[in-house]
Amino acid sequence: MAIRKLILDDFFETEAFTLIGIHCTIEDYRLAYLINKSLEINLNRKPKDIDNCNLHTTYSIFEWEDQTQLVTWNLVSNSCKVKSSQEATASNSLFNSEQTNTKTYHLVPEYKKVNYLLKIESELNENKKKLILSKILNISQVVTAYAIDTELLKSKDNLIFN
């Protein structure tokens, strides 16, 4: 009797996209403005941030849908800081004191030092990718930017925004 094997990879196509990691310390709206100006695109803040209810984290997201080339661009923050307060009672203290702890979560934990991610929902050729990277690197507030190999990402599911 023949044994049949069903491979699900044949049925589910993974959408190819380009991912660029950006290191900078400016606010998200300022970076979106500078990228819009540099790349001549029109990133706009989405009304609702990316929300992870399990960790109580939100990540800001900017989006632009290029109607001529049918490509969606997303600029998303990679880090979220969550403050939690704990009431600490010391046995020697006369007053109750409150301690606040700040914990940082990352949308793509493999790249913890990346501040922002630019996702282009299209597989770009090397020349186009280099052109976009050089324009981003020409922004004076950007420390560095580089293409991230999406095949090696373990947390690829976190980059599904729709």
Image (cartoon, helix red, strand yellow):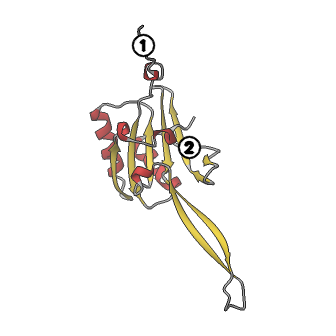
Residue at 47 percent across and 19 percent down: it is: 11
Q: Nearer the viewer, residue 103 or 1?
A: 1
- Locate residue 12, reporting x and y percent: 48, 23
Q: Return the residue at label 1.
A: 3
Check disc 1: other Cα within 10 Å, few if <14, some if 14-19, many if 20+. few
**SS at circle 2:** strand
Compared with residue 41, is residue 138 higher up or lower down, i.e. above or below?
below
Residue at 51 percent across and 27 percent down: it is: 67
Q: Nearer the viewer, residue 35 or 149?
A: 149
Residue at 47 percent across and 22 percent down: it is: 8
In the image, taking residue 150 as reference, residue 65 lies left or right, namely: right
Amino acid marked by disc 1:
Ile
Mark 2 touching mark 1, by CB under 8 A? Answer: no
**SS at circle 1:** loop
In the image, taking residue 144 as reference, residue 27 lies left or right, namely: right
Q: Quadrant of the C terminus?
A: top right
Q: Residue 78, which numbered label?
A: none
Residue at 43 percent across and 19 percent down: it is: 10
Check disc 2: other Cα within 10 Å, few if <14, some if 14-19, many if 20+. some
- Locate residue 149, reporting x and y percent: 34, 40
Compared with residue 79, is residue 76 higher up or lower down, i.e. above or below?
above
For marks 2 and 1 on the same chain, the one whose residue lies earlier in the sequence? 1
Q: Return the residue at label 2.
A: 44
In which image quadrant can residue 127 be found?
Answer: top left
- Locate residue 119, reporting x and y percent: 44, 40
How many tags in the picture? 2
- Of tags 2 and 1, which is closer to the observer? 1
Compared with residue 90, is residue 47 higher up or lower down, i.e. above or below?
above
Residue 86, visible in the rendered structure: yes
Q: Nearer the viewer, residue 25 or 159?
A: 159
- Locate residue 71, reporting x and y percent: 46, 30
Amino acid marked by disc 2:
Asn
